Amino acid sequence: MESTRTANEETSIALRPRFLGAVGERVFSLQFSPGGAVRGHIVYLPPFAEEMNRCRTAVAAQARAFAAQGYACTLLDFYGTGDSDGLLEDASLQRWHENIHATLESLQADTEAPLILWGLRLGALIALDFAARGGHPVSGIILWQPVTGAALFVNQMLRQRIAMLSMRGLPAEKTGDIRARLAQGERVEIAGYTVSGQLVDDLEAIDMAGMRNLCSGRIHWIEHVMEPGREPGPASRKAIADLESRDNTIDTHTFTGAQIWQVANREPAADLIAVTSGLSL
């Protein structure tokens, strides 16, 4: 990603907090705006639960880097998360798609420019799902360590609850028990976050199969490896091959260093940011 911005433009990045929607339904976003003309809009879709908080430092640093290169980068908090209104237990994937749609509409009303979706972990999978529905033309997609299998991700969530119950000495549950409670309309706490069966079902239903022509440009798949030069893992390679077989152009990139979505301390993620800032968008 080449930049011809001047030093003054790079130091004049503005932060623009914004709420969209009526009170009780408001969705919060924070835009990092460039000092000059806008080359494009980059909209960030966050990961799930505590991963969102762990990654804030690195995400803000990347957003600032995008703005320095002339992109208006908007960080979105889904309904029921972050600084947006509502409770996570009342959220649904459809509601989150509506959040994305409203954000994109407001950005294009401000400045018409190409749209790039940027997602991290579950947010990356949601970015692909949103693009697959075709509600907005997307010129490019940036994926940070994308979740490749929604069903596996949900099972990992449920296992976190099982582990929590064990650590607290509470009555044990199996994943089937948790699913039954959710199916009956109960709200269940998982890793400190209360979720509904609706959201769990929505997330589990996301399927990369059939996702065709997701954007007019390239999908940049960026994945952590333990050593430079290694390939992404087998699940990612399979997902990439499946997407490429459906007329999607994917560039694969790797980075080393901290796995920011896993560590409690907020890490700077210098290698990840360097790789991302060097993309050709």
Image: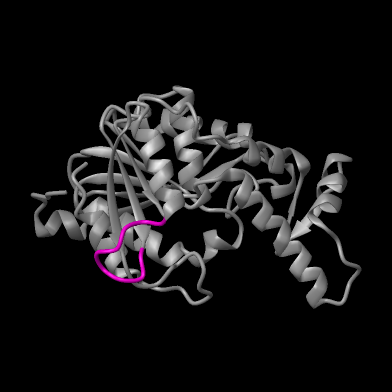
One can see residue 22 in this view: no
Left or right of 12 in this view: 148? right
Magenta region, main secondary structure: loop
Provide the residue span drawn in magenta.
Answer: 225-233
Q: Is residue 215 above or below residue 255?
A: above
One can see residue 85 in this view: yes
Q: How many marks?
A: 0
Frontmost residue, 76 versus 122 = 122
User: Image quadrant of residue 233?
Assistant: bottom left
Could you tell me residue 142's position as x and y percent?
34, 45
Name the quadrant of the C terminus: top left
Left or right of 61 in this view: 168? right
Left or right of 257 in this view: 187? right
Could you tell me residue 122's position as x and y percent?
53, 49
Could you tell me residue 150's position as x and y percent?
59, 44
Q: Is residue 14 above or below residue 90?
A: below
Which residue does the image show at 33% across and 55% down from the upper left? 63
User: Image quadrant of residue 250?
Assistant: top left
